[in-house]
């Protein structure tokens, strides 16, 4: 069950789904939703996932979830840089304010998580960060009825601890950071 939760609710999948939903919700036209959604998903999900999977195929990393903490430096930096590039591209392209605010808040959470993980060598759970952030963002955009999804975040956190890939503290830190970025910062920017 823990492995299934980790795979189904992996950061790349949740980020892609969330960005598509918010692009669709905030765009003025179908064309804008598709164009801006693709830019956001490519930069914050697809390009980082491609980089990680390519590294796994070339045996630079042991697995796509980067459970070996010493292997996280470059993938996390690529995720950070790619998301920053996507944020800048969306800003220059005149993306809907809500989509731009969402990806900017995601970038802000990475600006905290990446240095802590890389420099302090304490692995904040990106799975927990993204799961909690996704639930918070969905509630911000689509209303409190989506609070029914709240159990998703602790379930993902449990899975990461059960698999021995994070400590409870790392999962809690990820969850708090993700929820704060999209539950507090995102609405302020939007």
Image: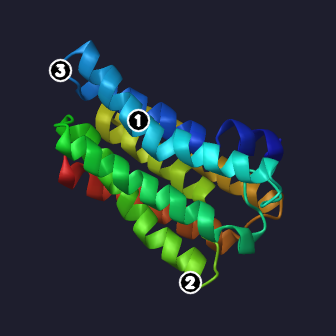
Q: Which residue is mark 3?
A: 28
Name which residue lies at 79% across and 39% down: 4
Which of the labelled discs sits on residue 19, or is there none? 1
Circle 1: is it few (<14), some (14-19), or many (20+) Cα within 10 Å? many
Which of the labelled discs sits on residue 175, or is there none? none
Q: Which residue is mark 2?
A: 119
Q: Earlier in the sequence, mark 3 or mark 2?
A: 3
Tell whether 181 sits left or right of 129.
Answer: left
Q: Is residue 115 above or below residue 184?
A: below
Res 57 seen here: yes
Could you say where residue 125 lies in the image, as x and y percent from the top left?
A: 62, 63
Can you tell which quarter of the image residue 109 is in?
Answer: bottom left
Name which residue lies at 20% across and 45% down: 91
The reply to whether dot 2 and dot 1 touch (C-beta < 8 Å) is no
Name which residue lies at 19% across and 52% down: 189
Circle 3: is it few (<14), some (14-19), or many (20+) Cα within 10 Å? few
The reply to whether dot 3 and dot 2 touch (C-beta < 8 Å) is no
Could you say where residue 154 lies in the image, as x and y percent from the top left?
A: 62, 52
Q: Earlier in the sequence, mark 1 or mark 3?
A: 1
């Amino acid at each position: 069950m823990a492995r299934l939760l980790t795979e189904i609710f992996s950061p790349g999948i949740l980020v892609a789904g969330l960005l598509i939903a918010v692009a669709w919700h905030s765009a003025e036209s179908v064309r804008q939703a598709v164009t801006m959604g693709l830019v956001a998903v490519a930069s914050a999900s697809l390009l980082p996932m491609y980089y990680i999977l390519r590294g796994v195929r070339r045996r630079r990393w042991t697995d796509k979830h980067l459970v070996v903490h010493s292997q996280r430096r470059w993938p996390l930096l690529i995720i950070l840089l790619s998301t920053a590039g996507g944020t800048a591209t969306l800003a220059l392209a005149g993306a809907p304010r809500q989509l731009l605010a969402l990806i900017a808040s995601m970038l802000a959470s990475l600006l905290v998580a990446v240095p802590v993980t890389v420099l302090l060598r304490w692995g904040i759970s990106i799975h927990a960060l993204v799961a909690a952030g996704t639930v918070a963002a969905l509630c911000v955009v689509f209303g409190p009825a989506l609070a029914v999804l709240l159990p998703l975040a602790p379930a993902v956190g449990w899975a990461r601890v059960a698999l021995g890939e994070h400590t409870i503290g790392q999962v809690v830190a990820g969850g708090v950071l993700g929820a704060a970025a999209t539950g507090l910062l995102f609405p302020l920017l939007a």
